Image: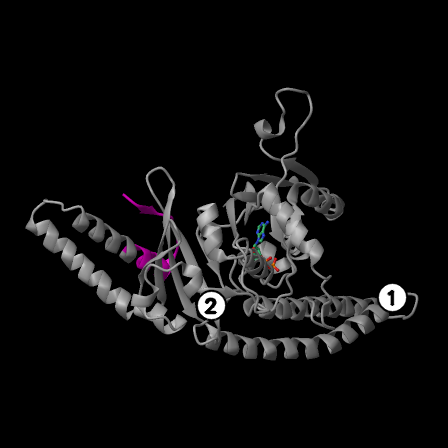
Amino acid sequence: MITTLVIGGASLIVIGLVVGFLLFSRRKSGGSKSGSALASSLSNEKMKSDIILNTIVDGVMLLDDEQAIQLFNPAAGTITGWEPKEAIGLDYKAVLQLIDDKGIQLDALSDPISKSFSQKITVHDRSTYLQTRSKSILSMDISISPLLDDKGEPRGVVVVFRDISEERKQEAQRADFISTASHEMRTPVAAIEGYLALALNEKVSRVDEKARSFLEKAHESTKHLGELFQDLLTSAKAEDGRLTNHPAVVEMSEFLETLTDGLKFSAQKKGLGVEFVLGSQDSIIDASSTNVVKPLYYVHVDPERVSEVITNIFDNAVKYTESGKVTVGLTGDENVVQVRVADTGPGIPTSDVSHLFQKFYRVDNSATRTIGGTGLGLFICRKIIEMYSGRIWVESEIGKGSTFFINIPRVTREQAEQLKRNESVQLPHISAPGSSI
Ligand code: ADP
C-alpha cells in the first residue's frame, strides 16, 4: 500500500487521483477476485481519475523508483512538447529538462525532483525553468511529492507542474512599478528625515519646546515611511523572484551563534536576557568523553538573506517583549535544520496566527498601535525561507510568549563538501550596479 506525504491545495487532489490510479492499476493487475461490485466501483474511480487528469491544465507525471515516467497527462505533453505515449517509460530528465536562469541544466543538488527523491520530502519550487522539446524556455511552478511505502521507503514521486511565464511577466511589471515608485519616493523621504534630524539637533538649530515635540512626531513618522518604502521594495522583489540570492554552504551553529552575539545588544538595552541553545541536550554530549560535540548543521542558502530573516524575527521578539528573555535555538534531524526564536512576550492570539505571514498583517492590539511597524517583515521572511524550500511558522500562547520556527533543508557533509568545491571553481559573483537591495 502506498501512502503520500502531506502537501496543500490542488496538488494534494492531484496526488489523490494519482494514488487512486495506482491502486486501481495494482488491484487490476493483481487479479483480485473481490467481486464485481468492487471492480466496477474501482473502474468508476479510475474513469473519474482519468477524466480529471486528462482535462486538468497542470502537467502531472508519476515517476517510479527508477525515475522513469509511468504516468504523463495531456497537459504535461502540451507544456513539454512530448506526446504522452512517447514519454512513458523514459527517464524524466529526457522529457523534463530543468534549467536555471542562466540556461544551465540543474545538477542533482539543485534539481527539485532529485531533492524530493533523495530527501523524501515534498518540494515546491518556482525558481526553475523548463527547456521544451522545441527549445522554448518556460518559467515553472513545480511541486513534487514522494510516494512512500509502509516502511517509509520512496516508491516514486508525483510531479505537478505548470507554465507561469505569463504570470511572471505580469509580476515583473507590477513589481517594476512598485520598485520605481518606492525608489522615487524613498529619496525625498530620506531628505525630509535628514532635515528633520538637523532641526532637532541642538547643535545646529534652535526650536522651542512645542515645535520640538511636533518635529519629533514628524521625524518618527518619516522614519516609518522610509522603512515602509524599503520593505515595499524588498517585498516586490521577493514576490517576483528578483531578490538577489547567492547561495553558499553555511554551517548554521557557528553562523547563528555569531549572529545572536551581534543581535543581543538591542535586547540587553531593553533589559531582556538573551540565550543561545545548540541542539537538544542529549545530542551535544559525547558519551565517551567530557567534550561537548557540536553537531554540524549544513544548509545551502544565501547567508545575508537568512541573516535578514533571523534578525527580523529577533527584532520583533525584542520589540514586542516587555520583560524576560529571548532564546535563539538550533536543532535538526537528518533532513532539516531548525532555528527557533522564543520570547516571553505577550503572545499572539490564535485567530491571528494563520494570517501573520501575509502582506501588511499586523495584530490589532494596544502594543501594535503604539509600536511602529509595516506588517511586511514576516511576509518577506516567509518569501525568503520558501525560496530555499523551507518553512516558517509560529507557536504562541497568550501571556506566555511566542516561538518562531524556521525549517531549512539540511545538506549532508558530503553534499556540503561537493557544493564548496563547485563554489571554489566558480568565478566570484559581481552584482550589477544597484541590483542588490
Ligand atoms: P511589523 O513591522 O508590524 O512588526 P511583521 O510582519 O514583522 O510586521 O509582524 C507582523 C505582526 O506580527 C506584528 O505587527 C505583531 O503584531 C506580530 N508579531 C510579530 N512578532 C511578534 C512577537 N514576537 N510577539 C508578539 N507579536 C508579534
Instruction: Name the residue tied to disc 1.
Output: 201
Residue 264 screen position, x and y as percent: 73, 44
Residue 33 screen position, x and y as percent: 9, 44
Residue 254 screen position, x and y as percent: 70, 42
Label annotation for residue 140: 2
Residue type marked 2: Met
Question: Which of disc 1 and disc 2 is earlier in sequence?
Answer: 2
Residue 13 shown in magenta? yes
Question: Local crowd at mark 2 within 10 Å, few (<14), some, or many (≥20)?
Answer: many
Residue 317 shown in magenta? no
Q: 145 left or right of 393? A: left
Q: Is residue 268 above or below residue 206?
A: above
Q: Using the image as rendered, state which of residue 299 and residue 105 is in the foreground.
A: 105
Label 2 residue near ligand 1, CB within 8 Å = no
* Quadrant field for ligand 1: bottom right
Q: Secondary structure at mark 1?
A: loop
- Quadrant occupied by the N terminus: top left
Q: Which residues are magenta?
A: 1-16
Question: Local crowd at mark 1 within 10 Å, few (<14), some, or many (≥20)?
Answer: few
Q: Are marks 2 and 1 in contact (CB under 8 Å)?
A: no
Coloring scheme used: one colour
Look at discs 2 and 1 and give the one toward the viewer: 2
Q: Using the image as rendered, state which of residue 104 and residue 203 is in the foreground.
A: 104
Residue type marked 1: Asn
Q: Is residue 29 visible?
A: yes
Q: Is residue 252 above or below residue 185?
A: above
Q: Using the image as rendered, state which of residue 313 and residue 109 is in the foreground.
A: 109
